[in-house]
């Protein structure tokens, strides 16, 4: 079986339908471009939901992985290994935090932050056992574990997976006052995405993150920033919180931390927060494994140069300027920051999936969300010419759907 059609048919017959992929079977990739099994090339404007910020096959990351593969890939945390200390120190320095707790997937990192916040609430803040609550936002997306979907407001993620985990209070995104009103004596944390990615790349009002930070400090609760998608260069800063010079108590990181090579996630916090975790209370056999650490060290070194953040900022200006030109021409609204955009298509013209399929035919990979919205997040290594070309394809695709 070598053709796209044959492989898609086999996939549909033999795998659970938990995703609805576009009809393309990718075979290889370099930089911002991928090639399918039939030999056709596409410009990747999704980047594995920001997992590939540094491009497909980034040589520094691949070299680090290959070197580590030849030496050591797994010890479990039963033993130390020679990459672990460098990873923890490097990520701690990047975030400005004392300590790091490594896991594998973004959802695991969110679960870790939830557990740490609750334990901190009981042991440091003095909340009565079993009474801790965490404030979360409408439209959130933090993963799909049973605890996380318990506070999702997306019916696809939430419905028919109960009974649900208690201990969460959902408030409107973008309103610090709504958070204030939800806080009580048992509140231990606020969990927030600095930009809501899955919801359509929603950027909160200016000053929102600052207000949340000040509120958490005043109320003696933790601010947890889920930067799994927004962090590590995507928005033109190392973290999306940096735009308001806000430092959360806990960073939640993943996706790009693994360089598109292996799953790597972590939370980072100061000792007065992460110091409450003791042996046997949380862990993962693969969390912080040698291969993952070697890859993440390479990622951290790339970010330490500042080149990727600056490039994402510069190209982001190009991306958003071009997208704004489409408003009123089949596009209703454009949002985002850096090389990350949510584009609302006029629902009377097409759905987001229809636009994504039209882009696919034109050699551009993008993905829809929530009906009429598409997301654009090309690798930061994309060239400016290729970026212009991608927006040209979007403009032409929308025009043709508008004028069949």
Image (cartoon, grey):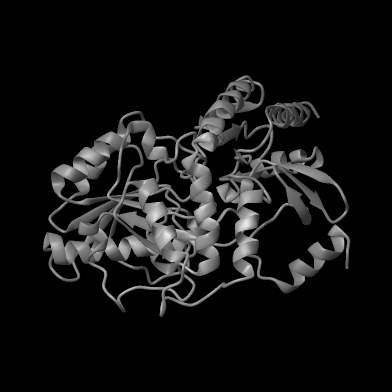
User: Is residue 113 shown above or below 74?
Assistant: above
Using the rendered view, name the quadrant where residue 25 is placed. bottom right
Residue 161 coordinates in the image, percent (x, y): 46, 69
Residue pictured at 49% horizontal, 69% vertical = 289
Q: Is residue 2 left or right of residue 285?
A: right
Quadrant location, the N terminus: bottom right
Using the rendered view, name the quadrant where residue 28 is placed. bottom right
Residue pictured at 80% horizontal, 69% vertical = 10
Residue pictured at 46% horizontal, 59% vertical = 265
Residue 163 coordinates in the image, percent (x, y): 38, 72
User: Is residue 260 shown above or below 54?
Assistant: below
Q: Nearer the viewer, residue 197 or 290?
A: 290
Give the number of callouts. 0
Q: Nearer the viewer, residue 26 or 128?
A: 26
Residue 291 coordinates in the image, percent (x, y): 55, 66
Q: Is residue 400 left or right of residue 372?
A: right
Q: Nearer the viewer, residue 82 or 225?
A: 82
Residue 54 coordinates in the image, percent (x, y): 60, 45
Quadrant location, the C terminus: top right
Q: Does residue 137 appear in this view?
A: no
């Amino acid at each position: 079986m070598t053709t796209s059609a044959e492989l898609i048919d086999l996939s549909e017959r033999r795998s659970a339908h938990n995703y609805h992929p576009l009809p393309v079977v990718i075979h290889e990739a370099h930089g911002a471009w991928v090639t399918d099994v039939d030999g056709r090339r596409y410009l990747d404007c999704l980047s594995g939901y920001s997992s590939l910020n540094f491009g497909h096959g980034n040589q520094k990351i691949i070299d680090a992985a290959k070197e580590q593969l030849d030496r050591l890939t797994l010890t479990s945390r039963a033993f130390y290994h020679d990459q672990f200390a460098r990873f923890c120190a490097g990520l701690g320095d990047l975030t400005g935090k004392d300590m790091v707790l490594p896991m594998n997937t973004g959802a695991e990192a969110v679960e870790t932050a939830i557990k740490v916040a609750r334990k901190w609430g009981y042991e440091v803040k003095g909340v009565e056992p079993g009474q801790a609550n965490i404030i979360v936002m409408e439209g959130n997306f933090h993963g799909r574990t049973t605890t996380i979907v318990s506070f999702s407001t997306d019916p696809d993620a939430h419905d028919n997976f109960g009974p649900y985990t208690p201990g969460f209070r959902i408030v409107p995104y973008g309103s610090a006052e709504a958070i204030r009103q939800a806080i009580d004596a048992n509140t231990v944390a606020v969990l927030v995405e600095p930009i809501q990615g899955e919801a359509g790349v929603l950027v909160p009002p200016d000053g929102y993150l600052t207000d949340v930070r000040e509120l958490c400090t005043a109320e003696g609760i933790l601010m947890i920033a889920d930067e799994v998608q927004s962090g590590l260069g995507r928005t033109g800063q190392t973290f999306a919180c940096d735009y308001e010079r806000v430092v959360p108590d806990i960073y939640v990181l993943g996706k790009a931390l693994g360089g598109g090579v292996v799953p790597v996630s972590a939370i980072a916090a100061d000792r007065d927060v992460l110091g409450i975790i003791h042996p046997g209370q949380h862990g993962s056999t693969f969390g912080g494994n040698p291969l993952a650490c070697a890859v993440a060290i390479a990622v951290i070194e790339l970010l330490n140069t500042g080149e990727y953040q600056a490039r994402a900022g510069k190209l982001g200006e190009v991306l958003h300027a071009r997208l704004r030109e489409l408003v009123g021409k089949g596009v209703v609204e454009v949002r985002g920051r850096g090389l990350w955009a949510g584009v609302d298509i006029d629902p009377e013209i097409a759905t987001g999936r229809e636009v994504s399929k039209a882009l696919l035919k034109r050699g551009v990979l993008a993905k829809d969300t929530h009906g009429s919205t598409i997301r654009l997040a090309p690798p930061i290594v994309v060239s400016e010419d290729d970026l212009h070309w991608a927006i040209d394809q979007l403009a032409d695709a929308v025009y043709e759907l508008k004028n069949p």
